[in-house]
């Protein structure tokens, strides 16, 4: 029973999010893609998703496609590790942050709809499309592009960045609570930074989306800590 109540809210919310984010462009039908594009140019002087294509290689494409898919696996696997190690308080802290992150992120998708750069500036990429070495990227990209680009407005902020950042923050906080914590932190750091790079390399996110994802992760950690303290105070009353 405890296991069910510990895990059900998170699994249910992740399932709901994965099935609803394709409809983020329905409530507000316009988008802020043009503004995000201008911000990228203003900050960097060049669009980063275009600039990084000079380093495109089929092997890199496959690697980044792999790391890009880890955005939910990283926090969930850390949560499972904390759980089986009996660190229920730390587990609850992480899960609360993930739930706050997902809910806040989806709300921001509704208020500030934005699509991937690969849809908005498709005509200026060289090469026009990326190619993987083994077929993994192509299979994943076909899944990403199966949704309607007119309604798929789930890019700002990047929840791939936000959720992976949460995983990195919490493994840094709790590395002494799990076996081989320092090694896991090292592995997570490599994978998370690669995931951040993948969002730009694979043309899935504007760089501004990444900044917003980092801010959302920090916000979620702060609110999670506040919620945990408030809950602890209530249970003592």
Image (tube, rainbow, N blue to C red):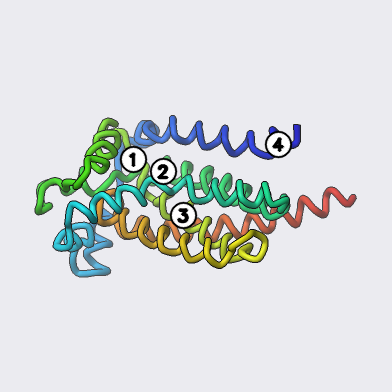
Tell me if label 1 and label 2 are in contact, CB under 8 Å.
yes
Q: Which mark is residue 3?
A: 4
- Return the disc, 1 or 2, that comes first in the chain's sequence: 2
Query: What residue is drawn where x is 17% and y is 62%?
Result: 55
Foreground: 164 or 13? 164
Relative to 54, say whether 121 is above or below: above
Residue sticking out furthest to the right:
237
Query: What residue is drawn where x is 52% and y is 65%?
Result: 183
SS at mark 2? helix
Quadrant of the image occupied by residue 109: top left
Left or right side of 182 for 124: left
Q: What is the x, y in percent for residue 117? A: 23, 49
SS at mark 1? loop
- Return the disc, 3 or 1, that comes first in the chain's sequence: 1
Nearer the camera: disc 3 or disc 2: 3
Query: Residue under circle 1?
Result: 153
- Return the disc, 4 or 2, that comes first in the chain's sequence: 4
Nearer the camera: disc 4 or disc 3: 4
**Image quarter of the N terminus:** top right
Query: Residue under circle 3?
Result: 164
- Return the disc, 3 or 2, that comes first in the chain's sequence: 2
Quadrant of the image occupied by residue 197: bottom left
- Characterize the local packing of mark 4: few (<14), some (14-19) or many (20 or more) Cα atoms within 10 angstroms: few
Q: Which mark is residue 109?
A: 2
């Amino acid at each position: 029973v405890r296991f069910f109540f510990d895990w059900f809210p998170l699994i249910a919310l992740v399932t709901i999010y994965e099935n609803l984010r394709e409809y983020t462009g329905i409530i507000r039908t316009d988008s802020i893609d043009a503004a995000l594009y201008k911000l990228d140019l203003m900050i960097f002087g060049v669009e980063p998703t275009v600039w990084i294509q000079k380093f495109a290689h089929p092997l890199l494409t496959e690697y980044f496609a792999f790391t890009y898919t880890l955005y939910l696996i990283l926090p969930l696997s850390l949560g499972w590790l904390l759980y089986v190690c009996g660190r229920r308080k730390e587990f609850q802290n992480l899960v609360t942050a993930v739930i706050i992150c997902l809910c806040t992120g989806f709300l921001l998708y509704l208020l500030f709809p934005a699509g991937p750069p690969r849809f908005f500036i498709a005509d200026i990429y060289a090469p026009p499309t990326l190619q993987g070495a083994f077929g993994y990227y192509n299979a994943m990209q076909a899944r990403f592009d199966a949704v309607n680009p007119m309604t798929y407005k789930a890019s700002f902020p990047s929840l791939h960045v936000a959720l992976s950042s949460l995983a990195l923050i919490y493994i840094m906080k709790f590395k002494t609570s799990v076996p081989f914590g320092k090694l896991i932190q090292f592995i997570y750091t490599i994978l998370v930074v690669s995931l951040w790079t993948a969002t730009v390399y694979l043309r899935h996110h504007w760089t501004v989306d990444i900044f917003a994802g980092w801010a959302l992760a920090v916000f979620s950690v702060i609110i999670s800590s506040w919620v945990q303290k408030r809950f602890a105070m209530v249970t003592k009353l």
